[in-house]
Image (cartoon, coloured by chain):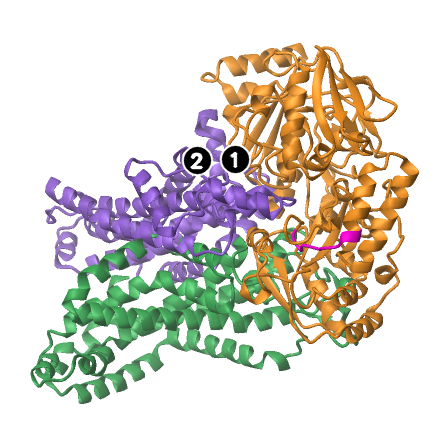
Chain colours: A orange, B purple, C green
């Protein structure tokens, strides 16, 4: 270990002499092909998963979420809540320090939470309860709430976008709508800013001063041990076949998201293992635009819901049985709120039923403008399946292909479908982003003003969500989540289309994978 | 001669200005919204509107062009929306791989194609000539990416001679640098070889029919000397010309080759930037490519003086 | 070969009409006798026949898919469900893709798209190039500015223009054709312009001008017919390039929507499995290469016979 570190230091000090040879010869380098390009380095400013994963490398969090969806302390050592649940006191564990050597203070934590609370959906919800925050001692901070709220820990222990990462105060004081300029955290890796080349590579060095927790790693919680000296994200290797070739030849160590079409081929390679690390995985989703014909009519939306059996989607997009699962819940299955309550309209339906519902709905033949992304292999086949099923149910479908970026731009438009708007699109969510009624963007009923794309408006749904936020008892929360799901199926906010797990492909000499839903690179060993 | 260079350089200015206007208009009429792309999946419309404002996308097109052109005059290509970096800096990072790939490609192409063309002309109508002409038409007909996959499969996976992907910077040593470039350069050079071999053959053929060749042969000069010294010298100008014209072809090929071989060059950058609607980057890269095209063709014109003493500017 | 060519100046003395007739006859005879033209032409006719007859060549709807028939090797039997819900037994001559679609049907229908893209982009580039070239060569005041714009357009690599244009518009058959044609326009324009500049000095054109014939009549009646030969040759090259560029655009993910079967799309989708199931790339690749080859051979043959001056140059 020490020699490896010495070599690393030598490499850093003498870049002119033999930089590549020293860095790659002696030091252990983990070469990863991430699922996409890393362009934005501010995980609060954008919800892109690549930015979140970058955040996990260099930042630490107050709490983590373990594989059983339980909130576990990470930077926090202990905490108490007052009997009226309005005052929360947190004590930080000793020895926390940023990469520049400065200790992590409660002021850093408060500033980081405040910035996150301006951008993240759950953060915004939480801060509608927060009265103030302060720091009574150098290792303690307190959160004062106006009234009790049931999801404080769930929010600050949130495992997915946007994660409340803790940054130094001077960085966290950046306007929440501007990107941060400095990339320094207290996490297990240090970001090599000078080697970062977007579209080429991102480099992280082991933070040798990091003190991991004692617990074993699980989800985003537990000890963050680092057994390699350097992690390199290969951002240039985007071609699916070239990725497989590179892994086969050992030019890279890990493929974060190999194409499902390649999995069979990867399994046959002697030096390659397929790792299944995410138990809850991702959910496919079809989202209706509630503002325009024909999906402004809930009965038409229900007919579409009835047509969407999940199996055809999963078979076409994933194909391999061991990686997909039919799941009626809007909160994904195997999660605290996952249940089949209220889902009969979709889960017990078929094309015949959909045809009847559509006839009864008064659908006038308005074509459904369905947006299909052409460059996102992970969801590319879904729209074709949706179109085929809807046509069979009696819909007229206008399948419009475009690249994902155009789609993302166009779905923000509220105009009529024939004037640059849209009726429906499909996407995929990581379970963690939709597994409770506050985080799940598709379940808001806020309507045109501040709702998520599709702009469902429903006062009942909003009322139930408000109740959920205030509920502090687990049984009551579960009941409310069920009520919310029932209501959402009733008005057909969107359609869950089944779940899949994304296998990871790695060389056999990589070990230490653990159960987690994000792409996390600690605890991995390379022999 | 200097006057000629000065005149030519001046003449490129309006061309580049036209390119700038064309590209700017083309991009600003696009439906994609860079702000929505930057904001990520869960952002709501309000947040997107805020980002659009901060990028200056709410200004009129004329105002946006004015700002951009103003910066351009000071050599500033603006800041990339997507990569949050100066476009100049971004291009700087990506320049080396593309430059290396293009240089090696042209080198391979000239070294292979010119001898082939000379031999084909020398053995005009023979089997070698026929084969070469057949190959050259074929070379134009195979898509670059199919060729790339076949070469990777054969050379890297089956034979294990070369790496399948990636790029090593020159600072990491010359051999690793070269090893990673050989396959992409061969892939890319095929169409170029086809083109240059044809032109060489035609020019040498023409020269071989001239009186001075007959004179040279009559004097008893060895055949290779006739071919190389007289016939080939005569072919230099057309070959140089076709290299100049072929630059556009080469840049097109670079875009695809860099994708397959995971080379972080300008071609890859262009595609990424287009997909992300990163206007400043697209404008910068296209402007750069246009400049390179114009500049290389200027060099080609100047090279005529060197190859053919009769030409004076 | 140059000796066989009738000297253009000889005809200049004759009336334009009879000159054109003589030229056409002899040209046609020479074209027919050329082996390149015979081979390339026959292949093209065959491909055209395939494109037209696609529905009766044992194909199914190329967009139909069935998860049960994924990744079948060439020659295997499988099932496919049509839009009415009927299950058909089908032999997948060229195998199936990862969707479970019939590659043979996709390749055959893809012939239509590729030929349409190639031919239409050639015609479009040609018609724009002719109009601009004629105007530029004939109207002196327009010549300068127009040629500068053409210089600008020419200095941007064609594929970049096409990519940028397709990012701007929604990719459809029409926009792809236009995006492929636009970068080719400057070359045609220059060719036409240079031909016009040569021909307008000919005595028969000067005679027509002195007789007070309107400019458009001179352009289309006298000048255009004499530019036909090099333009036909140019058209074949644009057509070949167009077919290739379409495939490259699809490969880069900015071309026609993937549910439209084009050779480029089939290869782009199949490349993920190139090592495992090369048939996904192999069959459309062969069709693409053969088509482009045929068009190129045809072009070479036409060039040798119709335009010997150009033949000497390239």
Q: Which residue is mark 2?
A: B90
The residue nearer to you, when weighing A4 against C200, is C200
Q: Are marks 1 and 2 on the same chain?
A: no
In the drawing, what numbered circle is on residue A198? 1
Q: Position of residue C42 (x, y in %)?
A: 46, 78
Crowding near the residue tagged with mark 2, few <14, some 14–19, many ≥20 C-alpha atoms within 10 Å: many
Query: Is any atom of residue B155 visible in this view?
Result: no
- Within the image, what quadrant is residue C215 found in? bottom left
Q: For the residues labelled 1 and 2, say whether their Cβ atoms are less than 8 Å apart.
A: yes
Query: Is any atom of residue A108 visible in this view?
Result: yes
Question: Which span of residues is magenta-colored?
Answer: A453-460
Q: Quadrant of the N terminus of chain A?
A: top right
Task: Report helix, strand or loop for mark 2.
Answer: helix
- Within the image, what quadrant is residue C67 found in? bottom right
The residue nearer to you, when weighing C102 against A477, is A477
Work out whether A97 lies above or below A69.
Answer: above
The chief SS type of the magenta part is: loop
Q: Residue at x 10, y 49 (%)?
A: B310
Work out whether A291 lies above or below A114.
Answer: below
Q: Position of residue A248 (x, y in %)?
A: 66, 39
Work out whether C152 lies above or below A20.
Answer: below
In the drawing, what numbered circle is on residue B168? none
Q: Residue furthest left?
A: C210
Q: Residue at x 62, y 47 (%)?
A: A241
Q: Residue furthest front?
A: A146
Reply yes or no: does residue A444 show up in magenta: no
The residue nearer to you, when weighing C271 against C124, is C124
């Amino acid at each position: 270990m020490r020699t490896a570190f010495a070599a690393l230091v030598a490499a850093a000090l003498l870049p002119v002499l033999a930089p590549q040879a020293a860095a790659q010869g002696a030091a252990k380098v983990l070469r990863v092909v991430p699922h996409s390009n890393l362009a934005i380095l501010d995980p609060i400013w954008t919800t892109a998963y690549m930015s979140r994963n970058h955040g996990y490398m260099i930042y630490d969090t107050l709490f983590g979420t373990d594989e059983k969806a339980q909130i576990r302390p990470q930077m926090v050592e202990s905490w108490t809540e007052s009997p009226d649940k309005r005052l929360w006191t947190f004590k930080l564990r000793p020895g926390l320090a940023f990469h520049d050597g400065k200790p992590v203070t409660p002021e850093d934590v408060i500033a980081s939470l405040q910035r996150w609370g301006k951008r993240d959906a759950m953060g915004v919800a939480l801060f509608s309860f927060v009265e103030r925050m302060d720091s009574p001692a150098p290792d303690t901070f307190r959160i004062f709430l106006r009234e009790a709220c049931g999801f404080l820990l769930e929010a600050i222990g949130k495992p997915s976008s946007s994660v409340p990462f803790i940054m130094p105060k001077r960085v966290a004081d950046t306007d929440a709508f501007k990107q941060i300029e400095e990339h320094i955290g207290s996490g297990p890796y240090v970001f090599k800013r000078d080697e970062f080349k977007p579209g080429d590579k991102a480099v992280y060095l082991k933070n040798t001063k990091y003190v991991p927790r004692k617990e074993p790693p699980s989800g985003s919680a537990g000890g963050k041990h680092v057994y390699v000296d350097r992690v390199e994200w290969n951002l240039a290797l985007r071609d699916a076949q070239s990725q497989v070739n590179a892994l086969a030849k050992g030019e890279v160590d890990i493929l974060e998201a190999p194409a499902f079409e390649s999995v069979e081929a990867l399994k046959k390679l002697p030096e390659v293992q397929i790792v299944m690390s995410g138990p809850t995985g991702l959910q496919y989703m079809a989202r209706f635009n509630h503002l325009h014909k024909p999906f402004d009519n809930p009965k038409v939306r229900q007919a579409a819901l009835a047509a969407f059996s999940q199996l055809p989607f999963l078979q076409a997009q994933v194909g391999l049985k061991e990686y997909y699962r039919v799941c009626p819940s809007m909160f994904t299955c195997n999660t605290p709120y996952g249940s089949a309550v209220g889902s009969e309209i979709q889960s017990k339906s078929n094309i015949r039923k959909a045809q009847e519902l559509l006839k009864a709905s008064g659908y006038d033949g308005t074509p459904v403008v369905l947006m299909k992304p052409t460059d996102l292999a992970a969801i590319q086949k879904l729209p074709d399946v949706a179109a085929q099923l809807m046509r069979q149910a009696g819909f007229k479908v206008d399948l419009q292909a475009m690249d994902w970026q155009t789609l993302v731009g166009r779905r923000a438009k509220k105009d009529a479908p024939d004037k640059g708007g849209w009726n429906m699109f499909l996407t995929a969510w990581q379970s963690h982003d939709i597994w409770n009624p506050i985080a799940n963007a598709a379940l808001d009923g806020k309507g045109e003003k501040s709702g998520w794309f599709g702009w469902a408006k429903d006062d009942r749904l909003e009322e139930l969500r408000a109740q959920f936020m205030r509920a502090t008892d687990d049984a009551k929360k579960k009941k409310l989540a069920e009520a919310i799901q029932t209501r959402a199926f009733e008005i057909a906010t969107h359609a869950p289309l089944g779940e899949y797990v994304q296998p990871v492909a790695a060389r056999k000499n990589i070990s230490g994978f653990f159960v987690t839903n994000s792409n996390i690179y600690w605890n991995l060993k390379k022999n | 001669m200097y006057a000629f260079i000065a005149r030519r350089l001046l003449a490129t200015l309006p061309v580049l200005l036209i390119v700038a206007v064309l590209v700017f208009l083309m991009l600003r009429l696009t439906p994609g919204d860079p702000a929505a792309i930057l904001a990520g999946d869960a952002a709501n419309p309000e947040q997107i509107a805020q980002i659009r404002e901060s990028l200056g996308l709410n200004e009129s097109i004329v105002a946006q062009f004015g700002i951009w052109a103003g910066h351009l005059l000071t050599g500033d290509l603006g800041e990339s929306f997507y990569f949050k970096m100066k476009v100049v800096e971004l291009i700087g990072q990506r320049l080396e791989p593309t430059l290396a790939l293009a240089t090696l490609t042209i080198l391979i192409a000239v070294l292979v194609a010119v001898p082939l063309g000379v031999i084909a002309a020398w053995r005009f109508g023979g089997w070698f000539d026929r084969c070469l002409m057949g190959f050259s038409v074929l070379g134009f007909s195979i898509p670059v990416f199919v060729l790339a996959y076949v070469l990777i499969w054969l050379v890297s996976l089956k034979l294990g001679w070369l790496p399948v992907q990636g790029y090593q910077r020159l600072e990491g040593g010359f051999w690793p640098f070269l090893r990673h470039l050989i396959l992409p350069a061969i892939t890319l050079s095929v169409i170029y070889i086809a083109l240059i071999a044809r032109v060489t053959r035609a020019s040498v053929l023409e020269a071989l029919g001239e009186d001075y060749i007959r004179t040279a042969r009559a004097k008893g000069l060895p055949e290779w000397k006739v071919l190389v010294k007289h016939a080939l010298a005569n072919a230099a100008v057309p070959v140089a010309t076709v290299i100049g014209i072929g630059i556009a072809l080469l840049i097109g090929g670079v875009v695809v080759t860099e994708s397959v071989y995971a080379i972080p060059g300008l071609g890859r950058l262009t595609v990424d930037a287009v997909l992300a609607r990163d206007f400043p980057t697209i404008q910068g890269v296209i402007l750069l490519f246009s400049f390179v095209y114009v500049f290389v063709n200027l060099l080609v014109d100047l090279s005529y003086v060197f190859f053919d003493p009769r030409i004076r500017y | 070969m140059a000796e066989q060519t009738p000297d253009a100046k000889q005809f200049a003395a004759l009336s334009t009409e009879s000159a054109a007739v003589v030229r056409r006859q002899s040209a046609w005879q020479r074209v027919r006798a050329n082996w390149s033209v015979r081979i390339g032409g026959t292949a093209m006719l065959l491909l055209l026949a395939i494109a037209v007859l696609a529905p009766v060549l044992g194909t199914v709807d190329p967009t139909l898919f069935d998860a049960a028939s994924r990744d079948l090797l060439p020659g295997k039997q499988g099932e496919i469900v049509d839009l009415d819900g009927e299950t058909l037994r089908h032999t997948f001559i060229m195998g199936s893709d990862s969707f479970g679609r019939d590659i043979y049907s996709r390749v055959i229908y893809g012939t239509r798209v590729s030929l349409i893209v190639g031919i239409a982009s050639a015609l479009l580039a040609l018609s724009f190039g002719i109009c601009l070239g004629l105007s530029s060569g004939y109207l002196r005041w327009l010549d300068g500015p127009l040629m500068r714009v053409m210089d600008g357009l020419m200095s941007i690599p064609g594929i970049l223009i096409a990519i940028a244009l397709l990012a701007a518009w929604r990719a459809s058959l029409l926009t792809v054709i236009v995006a492929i044609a636009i970068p080719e326009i400057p070359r045609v324009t220059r060719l036409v312009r240079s031909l016009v500049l040569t021909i307008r000095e000919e005595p028969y054109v000067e005679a027509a001008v002195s007789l007070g014939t309107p400019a458009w009549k001179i352009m289309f009646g006298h000048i255009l017919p004499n530019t036909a030969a090099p333009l036909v040759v140019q058209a074949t090259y644009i057509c070949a390039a167009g077919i290739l560029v379409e495939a490259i655009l699809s490969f880069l993910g900015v071309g026609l929507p993937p549910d439209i079967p084009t050779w480029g799309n089939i290869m782009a989708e199949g490349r993920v499995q190139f090592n495992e199931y090369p048939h996904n790339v192999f069959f459309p690749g062969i069709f693409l290469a053969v088509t482009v080859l045929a068009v190129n051979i045809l072009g070479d043959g036409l060039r040798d016979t119709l335009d010997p001056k150009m033949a000497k140059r390239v």
